[in-house]
Each structure stands twice: as structure tokens, then as C-alpha cells.
Image (cartoon, rainbow, N blue to C red):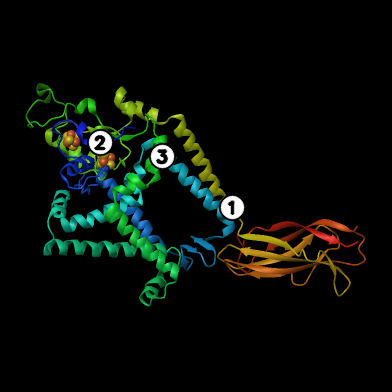
Amino acid sequence: MQVHRPAKDKPKGSAGKTAAARAAAEQKTGSLFSSYAARVKIQPRSVRGRYDNLRIAALVITQLVFFGLPWLMWNGRQAVLFDLDARKFHLFGAVLWPQDFVYLAGLLVFCALTLFFVTAVAGRVWCGYSCPQTVYTEIFLWIEAKLEGDGPRRRKLDDAPWSWHKLRVRGTKHVLWVLFALFTGFTLIGYFAPIRDLPMQIIHLELGPWQWFWFLFYAFALWGNAGFLREQVCTHMCPYARFQGAMFDKDTMIVTYDKERGDPRGSRSKKADPAALGLGSCIDCGLCVEVCPTGIDIRDGLQYQCISCAACIDVCNGVMDKMGYARGLIRYATENALTNHLDSKATAKRILRPRVLIYGLILLVLAGALVGSLVSRNTLRVDIIRDRGALSGIAENGDIENTYTLNLMNTSERPLVLDLGVTGMPELRIDGQTRIEVPATSNRMVPLAIHLPPTTTERPGSHNIEITVTPVPQEGEEDTGAKPRREGTVYMVPR
Ligand code: SF4
Ligand code: SF4
């Protein structure tokens, strides 16, 4: 990976200054001296094209999912709800408990592996198309562009002195940004509390302290990150930007500038023959720099700041169309394809390299295991807690008694009726109620006394026994959805 070149190393006459170049220029003329390059606000120019359409599609899909999911109902309940108070996670009819943490761990491993896989194949497409930072920055930029105009006009407004017009435009922009950020914060807490109750709770100031905190903190963080920090989050704060280089190799798809075809760069008229002028296809218009949300010049080679958004591809393709040149001076390509002039078939073959195939295989196995274990998950959980204070005792009727507590958990959306039984020694019996009802999505602690007659011929000491818990189908019900459980424990016969 190449480090971004300082402005002084750039080819002479290079139009469209990068953020670094503008920072250096401002530092030279500015009164403030600093050893560090000053940050120059990046005001990217908007662009239209195939990849822009893809980015808009990704934005719409991700935001429809984020904003729509908490409003979706399932079996009369919010389809996705992390009920932290009750320590339950409702997911489309399934109820996950803290004991199901393994699924969350599995999901996180799956997401991490997916990121490795996607990065090995197509570089930072996650950053360019669906990372929340990119998506929200795009939304904020869209609002900004509607009010203040495109990149160059916004730069002009930045430099203009404060006036009534500037105050009005900036004020409106911040009101809209804050409203959007608050709505996003509201949606976030709607994943942790019934979202339909939240509007009235907010109006009557009835949210809990943590709900207020996350609602306002998330909105504030979004306003700051998407409104002000923008590309700095990607270049300085995001750890992925730093370690993604380790997942790249020469067969990873990246956004590249075809130096062989583009250089030497230089302006010319549309009718001029570049070969006769000794020029390549790049007309040095600088538009690829102007549209870049991280303010870099892709013609300097791959840089860690590049988020693979392909805005430079779209704009350069437009320039090539206008000049009557072939598209693809900037394009998605692998380093190998570019240097060895590989065609798309040979490139695809090299992309499917062992590393990618292994990631893909692990992903498939993991996804199958996760889905399989979720689908075949037993909705009945049983924990036996032995009364350790009294290993055994003598009941009123003279029986040898061992006491336990059963923790019966029903993780399904319907009530369960359960029959208790005990096996392991011929004369064992349960003293008391053996039919128990556990309401939907709840657990019940049931005291259990197991008896053996005093005439027993069993030897003193501990014996392995099994407690059986069998779901009983109710009227009109063929299957409870829960499977019977057999749990082992120990029974003590006194000396
Ligand atoms: S947009 Fe294309 S033609 Fe214009 S400077 Fe960039 S690479 Fe050269
Ligand atoms: S160099 Fe191109 S692909 Fe990379 S961030 Fe800038 S505009 Fe996006």
C-alpha cells in the first residue's frame, strides 16, 4: 500500500487539489505555524453514475431495514426486541435468553469472517457502500447539498463572511441534521423498548435515564460524526482502515487508476490526438479528486484513506465519455490484472484463490451450523439445582426424601404443560404435583421432592438418577414444539 504523497511531489499543473495539498498550501500562507498538516474541510462534489446508483440502493436498503424493523410485528409482539429488563431477545417468534449467548458469539464470528471474505475479494466495499459512517455521511451531505449547493458552492459559502443568508442556510441545515439524528437515536432505543410506546413516553418525559442517555448520545454522536468528523472517522478512528491492508493482496479488487493508459496527463482539446501530443488518456481535470469524500487523488495509487466508494470511477467515466475515449481509466481491478494485462476471465480465476475459497467454505459451514442449531433448538430448558444444605432427610411419612429445585424455561411464544417423572431406582417417586404449566417466554422455579420408601434395599450413598420433563400437547395441538428433556442428578440414601 502506498502512502499518500505530499503535495510538493505531485505532477506540475495537477488540477483538483487533494485535501493534503490544500492543507499544505493553507499552512504556507496561514499565520499559524504547526508541525502537523492542518485539516482542510472536504466538500466533495456530487456525482452521478452506475456506482452512485449502487450506493443509493445500498443506502435505501440499509435504512429501510434499520428504521423499519422495530415497527414490524410478529405474533402480536415487536418482531425484533432486545428486552434487557427481562433479559430476553425476541427475534421473529424465537426468544433468545442469556443462555443463548453462543448464538450471538456465532453471529459475531460469522460477521467477522464475512468481512474478511469480502475484503479479500473486493477490498473495502463495505466501507464504500454500507458502513453506517458512509451511509449517514451521504445522507447529511445530501441535506447539505440541497441547502447549500454542490461542493464548490459549499466551499465558497465556507469562506464567505457571516451574513443573514449564511446564518439562515446553516441554521436550517443544522435543524434538519439534528432532527434526523434524533429520529435515528429514537429508532435505536426502539430496538430495546417497545417502539410504539416511545413517542408518548418522550412527550411526557417518561423515558428511563439510560433510555434518555442512549437516545441523546446516539443522536449527538451521529450529528458529530456525519456532520463534522466525516472522513476523519474513516482515516483516523476506524481500526478496520488500518488492518484491512493485511487482508489485501495482488488479487484483491480495488479502485485503481490505469497509469499506463492515463499518463502522461495533460489538458487538450476534444479533437486533439493524445498520441500526437505525447499524452495519455487523463486530461488532468481533477474531477476524480473533487468528488472523493476522503480528499485523496487515486492517481497516486492505492491509499489507506480510499474507502472504495467508486465516486472517482463514475466521474472519470463521464469525462471519458465526453472526450470520446474508452471508459475505465479509473476502475475496479486487481493489481495483478493491471500489471499483467489480464482479461476478466483470468482475473476472476485468480480472485477465486485458496484464501477466498477457505473463507467461503468456513462461512458456509458456520452459517449452516448456526441456522441448523437455531431451527432445531429445544424451546424447553431444564436446570436442576440440588439442595446442598440437606443431602437427604426423612419425610413425615418416614420416606427418604431428597429435595431439588427445577428451573423450567419456556423459550417459545406459547405456554407449555409439562409432566415430571423420575427414573434410575425402582421405587423412586415424586412427592407432590407432577404436572406443571410454564407460561410463554418465561421461566418457573419448581421445588421438587423425590421419595424412596424406608423399606428400600438400596445401598447407602449416592445413586445416579434422571429427572424427565415431558411436554404434553394440548387440545388441538399435535406438537408443542418442545422436545422432552432427561436431566441427570444424584440421589442420596443415608447410612
Ligand atoms: S477524472 Fe479522469 S481524466 Fe479527470 S483527472 Fe481524474 S483520472 Fe484524469
Ligand atoms: S479514491 Fe475514489 S474510490 Fe477511493 S475514496 Fe476517493 S472517490 Fe472513493
Q: Which mark is residue 28?
A: none
Quarter containing the C terminus: bottom right
Rate crowding at label 2 as few (under 14), some (14 to 19) or many (20 or more) other CA atoms within 10 Å.
Answer: many
The amino acid at mark 2 is: Ile
Nearer the observer: mark 3 or 2; the answer is: 3
What element does badge 1 sit on? loop
Residue at numbered disc 3: 243
Tell me: 156 left or right of 5.
left
User: Is residue 58 visible in this depiction of the protein?
Assistant: no
- Residue farthest bottom in this picture: 204
The x and y percentages for residue 455 are: 93, 66
From the image, state whether disc 1 or disc 2 is nearer to you.
Answer: 2
Q: Judge the density around disc 3: few (<14), some (14-19), many (≥20) Cα neighbours within 10 Å.
A: few
Q: Dot 2 corresponds to which residue?
A: 298
In x, y percent, where is residue 463?
83, 56
Of labels 3 and 2, earlier in sequence is: 3
The Cα atoms of the two marked residues, 1 and 2, are separated by 50 Å
Quadrant housing residue 413:
bottom right
Picture coordinates of residue 335 (x, y %)?
Answer: 33, 28
Q: Earlier in the sequence, mark 3 or mark 1?
A: 3
In front: label 3 or label 1:
3
Q: Specify which label sits upstream in the sequence, 1 or 2.
A: 2
388 left or right of 170 in image: right
Q: Is residue 39 above or below residue 74?
A: above
Tell me which image quadrant ligand 1 sits in: top left
Cα gap from disc 3 to disc 1, whole angstroms: 37 Å
**Which quarter of the figure is the N terminus placed in?**
top left
Q: Nearer the viewer, residue 213 or 129?
A: 213
Q: Secondary structure at mark 3?
A: helix
On the image, numbered disc 1 is attached to which residue?
376
Give the image quarter of residue 88.
bottom right
